[in-house]
Amino acid sequence: MVVCTQALRRQGLAILRSSPHTSSYRLFSQSPRSLNKFSVRVSGTGRGVAQNIKADGHPHLIQTDAYTFFEGHESAPTPLVYNLSSLGSCTQVAGSLVAKSLGAKLGEWNVAVKGNLDTGVLAEGKEGNGNWEGIEVDVRVQTDIEDRNVFSKFVSETERRCPIMQLFKQSGTNLKSTWVNEKL
């Protein structure tokens, strides 16, 4: 049974009750976990190329601006920076979930993401594809995984389950990843 009061809806929370003694909260979403669907809503307001973005039910504000090359003032990270940052952080989130399912322990993550973008489409209106031409993801993660095959499974399953990684791969972006297993 899903209980969604007006107050909970305003906060982006829903409570799933499978018994009187258990409940499950989902931030950012109006759907219970049992439906295996997750909706995220964001909205933004701004002037020029700067914008303030808020996720429904979340207290944090995300500010964006653009490089001066794109008529910005560089007062906040650009959407391009956030785009690559989301790939790095989503990889870490997905990897943490995969490690748990494998029974592996993780320590520190170091994730570096580099993207190459032809700005002609965005800035000048040239014909072509405005997508990233290539992205390189370098991951160094401390694990207790000693078997190479298990680490390879960890990597492939992390990349398969990461929605941001899949967004890039399925968009046709040339994405290259390098993973290093550091001893925990």
Image (tube, rainbow, N blue to C red):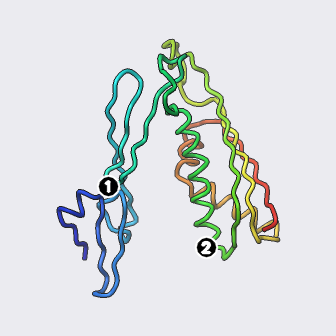
Q: Residue 136, percent across and down?
A: 70, 39
- Single out the residue that lies furthest toward the front: 75
Task: Indicate the quadrant containing the N terminus: top left, top right, bottom left or bottom right.
Answer: bottom left
Residue visible at 47% across and 16% down in the picture: 71
The x and y percentages for residue 162 are 56, 54
Residue 6: x and y in percent read 17, 62
**Amino acid under label 1?**
Gly
Callout 1 crowding tier (Cα within 10 Å): few <14, some 14–19, many ≥20: many
Q: Position of residue 142 (x, y in %)?
A: 75, 63
Q: Which mark is residue 57?
A: 1
Picture residue at 20% right of the left edge, 62% below the top: 7
In-image side of 85 versus 48 (left or right): right
Q: Is residue 38 left or right of residue 126?
A: left
- Left or right side of 169 for 19: left
Disc number at residue 101?
A: 2
Give the quarter of the image for residue 161: bottom right
